[in-house]
Image (tube, grey):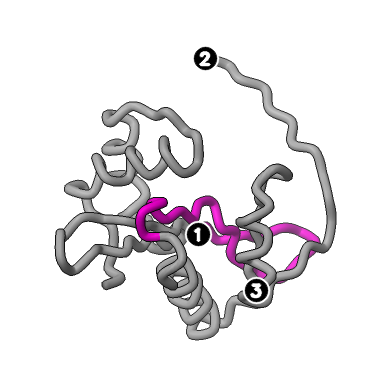
Amino acid sequence: MIREINILDAKDIQEICKDELGYNVGIKTVKTQIEKLSIDYEHHIIAVYEDKKTSKVVGFVHAEMYESLYSDIGLNILGLAVSSNFQGKGIGKKLMVFVEEYALNNNINFIRLNSASHRSEAHKFYENIGYTCNKTQKCFIKIFR
């Protein structure tokens, strides 16, 4: 079932981020971010998929409002991941439909996302649910700590 994220989901989210996305983030950071972002309803939409049998979170989606000087309001998917043991069961699609319905119900004009060039299976997934790749770009970062 899909529901809002809460602080009790931190360990499951940490594991999914590490195993499926390659982000080895500490539990303290995950908890801090859940506490901060889950109450910012104007900018962040975060939902989890909880397995009915185990009550364990096996997937999540995180979208952020996207506004710029050159576009209408949209959503930017910051994270979508499903535990490998649960992939292929429609969970990722259900999470994306959840975000799409939110967008449609809130007059949001588009949803965009980035996916690393090596994640070819993810690219197929997004194409299968109606997303198109409209450009290729490099990502630059400057880390201060």
Which residue shows up at 62% across the image and 59% down it? 66
Magenta-colored span? 64-86
Task: Inspect the image, locate mark 2, and give the three-letter code of the amino acid beneath it.
Answer: Arg
Task: Inspect the image, locate mark 3, and give the three-letter code of the amino acid beneath it.
Answer: Asn
Q: Is residue 26 above or below residue 20?
A: above
Which residue shows up at 75% across the image and 69% down it? 132
Q: Which mark is residue 37?
A: none
> Helix, strand or loop at disc 2?
loop
Task: Inspect the image, locate mark 1, and give the three-letter code of the amino acid beneath it.
Answer: Ala
At label 2, counting other C-alpha atoms closer than 10 Å, the crowd grade (few under 14, some 14-19, many 20 or more) is: few
Q: Which mark is residue 128?
A: 3
Residue 34 forms part of the magenta stretch: no
Q: Is residue 27 above or below residue 16?
A: above
Residue placed furthest toward the top: 145
Q: In the image, 144: left or right of 41?
A: right
Residue identified by numbered label 2: 145
At label 3, counting other C-alpha atoms closer than 10 Å, the crowd grade (few under 14, some 14-19, many 20 or more) is: few
Q: Is residue 144 above or below residue 104?
A: above
Residue identified by numbered label 1: 63
| Proximity of marks 2 and 3: CB atoms separated by less than 8 Å | no
In front here: 94 or 10? 94
Which residue shows up at 26% across the image and 72% down it? 1
> Helix, strand or loop at disc 3?
helix
Instruction: Measuring from the top left, give residue 109's x and y in whole percent.
Output: 66, 77
Instruction: Measuring from the top left, give residue 131's x and y in whole percent.
Output: 69, 71
Instruction: Measuring from the top left, give residue 11's x and y in whole percent.
Output: 24, 40
